[in-house]
Image (cartoon, grey):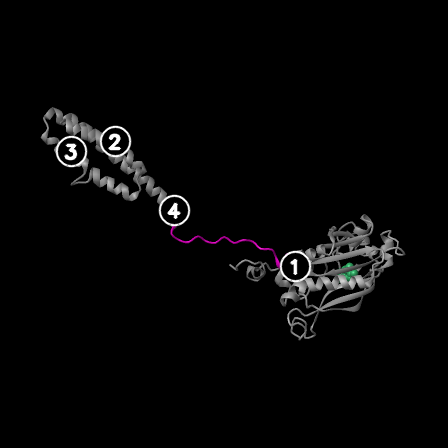
Amino acid sequence: MRDLLAAVHALRERLGEIPQADERRLQDLKTEILGRKAGALTKILGDLPKLQPADRRSVGAAANVLKRDFEAAFAARERDLARASRATVGLDPTMPGRPSWRGGLHLVTQVVAEICDIFRELGFTRAVGPEAETEWYNFGALNFPKDHPAIDVQDSFYLADGLLLRTHTSPVQVRTMEQYRPPIRVVSPGQCYRRDPFDPSHAPVFEQVEGLVVDEGVTFVDLKATLSAFARQFFGPHTATRFSPSYFPFTEPSADMQVSCSVCHGAGCPTCKQTGWMEILGSGMVHPAVLENCRIDPEHYSGFAFGMGPHRIAMVRHGIPDIRLFFEGDVRFLAQFSGEGAP
Ligand code: DAH
């Protein structure tokens, strides 16, 4: 009788194993303790008839309480496990993890950064100006005649109070010359806006990088040397440059710079329209009237300026046929240039 009572007490110790058991262990414990043939508690209950009636009652009572406790503990643990497995339905922990996407810089952002980096090495600092400008900064100070077509509301986005969205980054030239005295060497990247149709070669909003150098004795040779050095750095050491006469109200003389086609190296291809050359920027010597508008003496100082469109530059460098691709946000297009795998 003592043995059986000791066995009941010993078995009670094992209740503590149940809340930690996983599914398989729970089944094993159930069989070990309550199994119909060899369960430890089943055996104890089976041995009760061998006891004296008085002992049978007390041991039997203890064994039955223990049996109820075990049954309750098993049921509780089974409920917990079922709830946990419901919460993880569909989860296969053996599956390899999904790679998380890393973001990449937009191609145009990369090109702007690259352009500014090259000019930084040439001694240029960076300037920024507002996108909402006055007519004076956007046109007047830059020597645009009053009847210039760009000033027309048809061509520019006008805001309230005589402001407009700047149509180019050239107003930053004026703001820079007002704020700093020569020597000046700055580049200024930023967004510009024009009422242009959204077609393969135009976008109503686009990026520009402006450049300005003002000092004593700056000549057209400095312009050509600086911009050719930039072109070789950006497009490769064998890049040829050529300058052709152009017109901008704020420069005199003015010149467009072309570089030998980076796709066909001058042989002729669709990117350069079979000419072997790609036009990448406008430039010129700062017009004396512009210097005067900024209270810089044109007798004493001279300068050159340039403006380029990073969208266009990205297009000619990579042979991208349609500017609208930059605005569509299609990751299959963008990921080709972000250094990250496509999805
Ligand atoms: N502002 C001109 C444009 O929007 C680009 C430009 C041309 C800027 C010549 C300059 C320059 O600074 O000298 O087309």
Q: Nearer the viewer, residue 151 or 117?
A: 117
Q: Main secondary structure of the magenta part?
A: loop
* Corner quadrant of residue 280: bottom right
Q: Nearer the viewer, residue 49 or 22?
A: 22
Circle on res. 315: none
The residue at which mark 1 appears reads as 111
Mark 4 or mark 1: which is in front?
1
Query: Badge 3: few (under 14), some or many (20 or more) residues near its Cα, within 10 Å?
Result: some
- Residue drawn at point x = 87 percent, y = 58 percent: 288
- Residue drawn at point x = 15 percent, y = 36 percent: 43
Question: Which span of residues is magenta-colored?
Answer: 91-109
- Image quarter where the N terminus lies is top left
The residue at which mark 4 appears reads as 88
Q: Is residue 175 left or right of residue 276?
A: right
Mark 1 or mark 3: which is in front?
1
Labels 4 and 1: the sequence-earlier one: 4
Labels 1 and 2: the sequence-earlier one: 2
- Residue drawn at point x = 64 percent, y = 56 percent: 109
Asked if 40 appears above or below 168 in the picture, the reply is above
Q: Nearer the viewer, residue 191 or 229?
A: 229
What is the CA distance from the residue labelled 3 to the residue labelled 4?
40 Å
Ligand 1 under 8 Å from disc 1 Cβ: no
Type of amino acid under label 1: Val
What is the CA distance from the residue labelled 1 to the residue labelled 2?
73 Å
Circle on res. 45: 3
